[in-house]
Image (tube, helix red, strand yellow):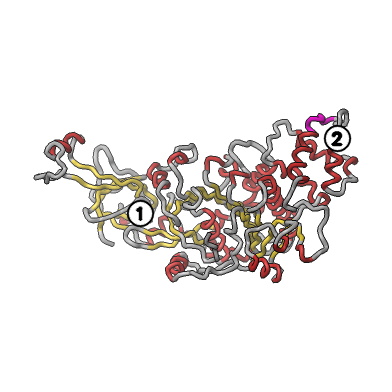
Amino acid sequence: MTIIGKVSATQNMPTSADDFAFWLQDDVIVAPFDLVSVPNAAGSTTVGVIREIYHTADSPSHIANYVSSDFGMVDVDVTTPRLGTTYAGVEVLNNDREIYMPLLDGAPVRFASEDEIRQALGIDAIPGERRVPAGFLSLSNSTIVPVFLDSAFLIGPEGAHINISGISGLATKTTYAMFLLQAICQSAESRRTANIIMNVKGDDLLFIDQMRPDLTSGVEKEWENCGLKAKAFDNVRYFFPYVKDGRHYANTWCDEGTLTRLFREGKAGNYIYTYQHDREKLDLLMSNIDDPNFTLEAIRNEILTSPRFDTVSDWNALNTELALRCQAGKGDTIPVVSWRRFKRLVSTIVSNDTSGIFQDARSGMPEKHHVHLAEEISKIKPGDTLVVDIAQIPEQQKCLVFGDVVRAAYRLKTEGEEECPERIIIFVDELNKYAPQAVKSSPIIGDLLEITERGRSLGIVLFAAEQFRSEVHGRVKGNCATNVYGRTNAVEIGTSDYRPLPKSFTNMMTRLKQGHLIIQHPIFRSMLKVVFPKPAYYQKVH
């Protein structure tokens, strides 16, 4: 490798075991996150990552520079140019002999080789069967290095869960999550994992079993750089909200031709909720409703345990019984005003439902394709991918469906079915809607905390994304072993979530390009900027 500069140690900026600086040769271009190598004591090699880049000159002040240009004449050629140099600040990542002596002044600096980078990052230490491609590094000297995550820290048992944040449309959060899921499907982990994907916006994830027709050789090459094949997902089933009137009774953005194919091939269903089957999920309907005195929870428990509700068989009968409780003197131990509030909420969400997911009973008409999500999740096998579409239903119903998915997966893992996948990965975007920072407790937050705190041992893994990390419940995001940062804004990087991170890295987050992300993973000794390929599955252009 060509020498690009030399270590610079000064009285004010000495080198240390943790960092050093080096001046650059005049024609060399480097960037933050480039990795460099330097010879160290006893024939060892130190590898570091560039964090800051500066240019300094011998001018004592900006006024001196102004004066030297003939008092601000911009077209004057200076007779004697200022002495100046560009230098970079580097964070030490690794020494191949574990010798962390400060680097000596004048030591030659080179771009790190692919082997040096793999060793410095700890990738070489990851057993082959635990390697999950995470993209690739693209250095300023055109070196391409595949990056791998350790599945033991991504999906358990050592650590688990991933959080991806960034501005919608620019941070490519969903695209990266789907890339990781495809990488897991192509890794040794595929034999023991299954995926449940929430489609929260439009038709973004409703064609993941189809190859994109405009796949270019350039995109295929990027997949190869990651050690993967560019391919769509296998063994996919889709579940849509039932609607009384509509194409195939499915409330979805999915097109007519695709719906016809999916139902014909038995790869889709329309989910519903009946009182008899789903009454214990009433609390999920009110997940984002403030309940400081737990009165709504008390009413839900009353409905589940009181003999007065044993004769209730459908949603209309529930509404009738609730109306009786709302009469003066009928509230028993729970105040009537609380019953009235509960009835009003149920009427708003269930009785006034115009979409159709709340049904009195499961239809025997095969063309309606009625299913219960919890039952379908209980049938999931290793290698399966389930897509649950919630894009077109109201927010309260989204809370119900997502909470139902989480609980069904949790129940499946805790009941220990023999054919159950060892790991179930649940991916959801807009996590801040289900686990907001401002709400300290809710039914869904409780379920998510149970998963994020125990999931690595239980075998339930959360892949989550949101625009602003600062808006997500602290304990939910705090339990994520891997964190990914996409393009964001200056206001967001000023929040407490970003203060522990190097300022140069957070500043770069405001100007990341699409397809570029910054990753923090337990085995990496520093944050890395990775590039990942465009999806190989079909995405409609709107």
Label 1: how many residues lie within 10 Å, few (<14), some (14-19) or many (20+)? Answer: many
Which of the two residues, 118 or 95, is positioned nearer the viewer here?
118
Q: Is residue 160 visible in this depiction of the protein? A: no
Give the residue drawn at x 41%, y 59%. Answer: 137
- Taking 116 as reference, is 353 above or below it? above
The residue beneath circle 1 is 34
Give the residue drawn at x 46%, y 64%. Answer: 226
203 with respect to 6 (left or right): right
- Taking 32 as reference, is 346 above or below it? above
Say which quarter of the image contains residue 182.
bottom right
192 with respect to 150 (left or right): right
Quadrant that contains the N terminus: bottom left
Label 2: how many residues lie within 10 Å, few (<14), some (14-19) or many (20+)? Answer: many
Q: Earlier in the sequence, mark 1 or mark 2?
A: 1
Circle 1: element type: loop
The disc labelled 2 sits on which kind of residue?
Arg
The disc labelled 1 sits on which kind of residue?
Asp
Q: Which mark is residue 297?
A: none
The residue beneath circle 2 is 325
Circle 2: element type: helix
Image coordinates for residue 310, horizontal then vertical, percent: 89, 45
